[in-house]
Amino acid sequence: MKGDFHIHTSNSDCSMSPGEVFALARARGITHLSITDHDTVYGIKAHQKLAGTFDLHYIPGIEISAYDYDRQIPCHIVGLYVHDRDEALNAMIRKTTEQRHENSIRQIQRLIALGYDISFSDFENKRGIHGIYKQHIMDVLIEKGYATEFYGDFYQKMFKNKGPLDLAIEYPSHTEAVRVLKAMGAIPILAHPTLYGNLESVPELVEAGLLAVETCYPSLQEEDRPTVMELVQTYGLASSGGSDFHGAYAKESNAALGTCYIENFSLLK
């Protein structure tokens, strides 16, 4: 098995369509994959058909953009074996996607007011299924020559550090995300635990129902791997992981699909 259980598509914030992603996965030798678009379970039936076309084992997934309010840091939770019929999950992610799109509208309006030559028509062929993401805004700004890279100086100045486009979203708590996924019969997984500094939250996530931790992902530094593996062993968690693929929108230069993969996922059904 060569499994990549953390992949995004153009239905959220990846530059490639689901069809392109499945074709690339097949070309890269992936045998098992999960599409884990941010805060959406859209496209499961289409993904199942694509999996048949490319002879791949597909697991319906999601990445919930959650927040650790005690530590004031993001904490993303991947869910595997999700479906689109759970009222609690749908209500939670709908709130996030609506806020994200509303923020994007305000960000575009602010850019126009600041004199940037962009319009809403620029996003018609870029937006995700639930709206516009900041990656889509950066994509347009790069095309227009206002920025040179997705997460460089322009991004840090405008979208971060209290810049004019730094708008907050009320995300669900990390433990709530785990509980909702567990209640619907999905497998809750702590995504890229060192990326936002989430290692200290593992005990409370386990209490909420966490079943696995990503132990293979592009931003994991070798010096942090023993600590991550120790937590997995201490709490009896499964090891998951993947490339966190975003296509051209990737933060990590080496985050190509199949770069990080799992050879044995103990919770595979």
Image (tube, rainbow, N blue to C red):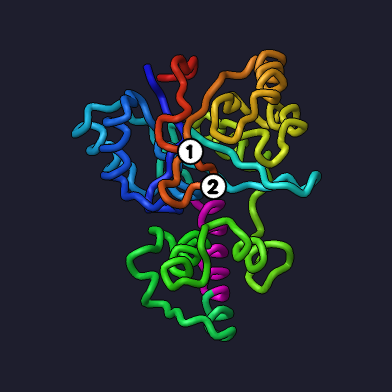
Give me the residue at 31% from left, 45% from top.
18
Is residue 165 magenta-colored? Answer: no
Image vertical order of residue 51 relative to residue 114, above or below? above
Magenta region: which residues? 89-107
Give me the residue at 43% from left, 31% from top.
81
The residue singled out by tag 1 in the image is 255
Q: Position of residue 192 (x, y in %)?
A: 60, 34
What kind of residue is marked 1?
Ala
Q: In the image, is 74 to the left or to the right of 138? A: right
Tell me the crowding category of disc 2: few under 14, some 14 to 19, or many 20 or more residues within 10 angstroms, Cα based: some
Image vertical order of residue 158 relative to residue 239, above or below? below
Q: Position of residue 38 (x, y in %)?
A: 49, 48
Q: Position of residue 240 (x, y in %)?
A: 52, 24
Where on the picture, by quarter, is residue 7? top left
- Nearest the viewer among 137 and 47 is 137
- Nearest the viewer among 193 and 206 is 193
Tell me the crowding category of disc 1: few under 14, some 14 to 19, or many 20 or more residues within 10 angstroms, Cα based: many
Q: Position of residue 107 (x, y in %)?
A: 57, 73
Q: Residue furthest left?
A: 53
The C terminus lies in which quarter of the figure?
top left
Q: In the image, is 103 to the left or to the right of 259? A: right
- Nearest the viewer among 158 and 197 is 158
Residue 119, disc: none
- Contact between labelled residues 2 and 1, with CB atoms less than 8 Å apart: yes
The residue singled out by tag 2 in the image is 251
Element on which disc 2 rests: loop
Q: Residue furthest right?
A: 70
Image vertical order of residue 81 relative to residue 127, above or below? above
Is residue 99 magenta-colored? Answer: yes
